[in-house]
Image (spheres, rainbow, N blue to C red):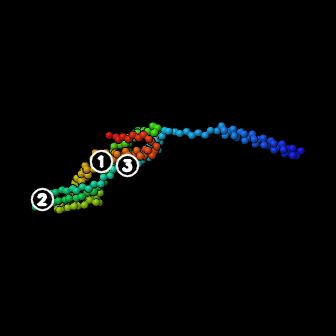
């Protein structure tokens, strides 16, 4: 009788195992794995803020040197002051000047409106490198300041030209296109504030 009771327990255990296994197989068959692909790319507020946080973005740096002189007429002789000024004029944009709605994304397309190209640093003359080329006579600090201002204006005239602004825009366009491509956008339109 003992072996009949053991046999019955084994039979009940085997039947329970078969039923459990059948239930598991049926459950797995009904389970479905699917992958949904979201084709839409959205620019998050965090991404927009991180782009704006760049602040000033330099697209073109122009190294320049200007020879500036002044002459003061005297009774017996003239006084001359000739100086060479060196500077680097930097053109780019300030991301804090973007207007509301400056970036609009839709699917795999994005439209970016950037502020106009401008001078990033108004103190572009390197006074430590300024050299007196020729100096005769006595000159006051006001005379040197007037010469500095003359050099400043010459550098602005020679460096902040329509050609250089166009070149800075082209560099900015290329950099923004690259950044938007790496974010996953295929169709990118970049325009500049007038």
Q: Position of residue 27 (x, y in %)?
A: 68, 39
Residue at disc 1, secondary structure = helix
Q: Nearer the viewer, residue 74 or 185?
A: 185
Q: Earlier in the sequence, mark 1 or mark 3?
A: 3
Residue at disc 3, secondary structure = strand
Marks 1 and 2: CB-CB under 8 Å? Answer: no
| Real-space CA distance between mark 3 and mark 2, rounded to the nearest whole angstrom | 49 Å
Q: Which residue is mark 1?
A: 164
Mark 3 against mark 2, which lies toward the viewer? 3
Q: Which residue is mark 2?
A: 74
Q: Which mark is residue 78?
A: none
Q: Nearer the viewer, residue 113 or 34?
A: 34
Q: Nearer the viewer, residue 30 or 168?
A: 30
Mark 1 against mark 3, which lies toward the viewer? 1
Q: Earlier in the sequence, mark 1 or mark 2?
A: 2
Q: Who's the residue at 45% across and 37% down the image? A: 106
Picture quadrant where residue 24 is located: top right
The single residue placed furthest to the left in the displayed view is 75
Q: Is residue 45 visible?
A: no
Q: Who's the residue at 46% across and 39% down the image? A: 108
Picture quadrant where residue 169 is located: top left
Q: Who's the residue at 12% across and 61% down the image? A: 77
Q: Is residue 124 left or right of residue 5?
A: left
* Quadrant placement of the C terminus: top left
Q: Which residue is mark 3?
A: 57
């Amino acid at each position: 009788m003992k072996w009949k009771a053991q046999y019955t327990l084994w039979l009940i255990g085997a039947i329970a195992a078969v039923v459990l296994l059948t239930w598991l197989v049926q459950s797995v068959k009904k389970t479905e794995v699917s992958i949904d692909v979201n084709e839409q790319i959205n620019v998050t507020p965090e991404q927009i803020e991180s782009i704006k946080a760049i602040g000033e973005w330099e697209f073109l740096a122009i190294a320049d040197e200007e020879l500036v002189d002044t002459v003061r007429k005297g009774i017996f002789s003239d006084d001359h002051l000739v100086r060479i000024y060196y500077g680097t004029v930097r053109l780019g944009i300030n991301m804090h000047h973007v207007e509301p709605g400056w970036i609009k994304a839709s699917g795999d397309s994005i439209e970016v409106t950037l502020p106009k190209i401008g001078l990033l640093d108004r103190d572009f003359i390197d006074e430590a490198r300024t050299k007196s080329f020729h100096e005769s006579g006595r000159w006051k600090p006001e005379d040197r300041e007037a010469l500095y201002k003359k050099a400043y204006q010459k550098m602005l005239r020679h460096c902040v030209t329509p050609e250089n602004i166009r070149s800075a825009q082209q560099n900015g366009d290329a950099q923004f296109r690259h950044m938007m491509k790496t974010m996953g956008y295929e169709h990118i339109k970049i325009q500049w504030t007038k």
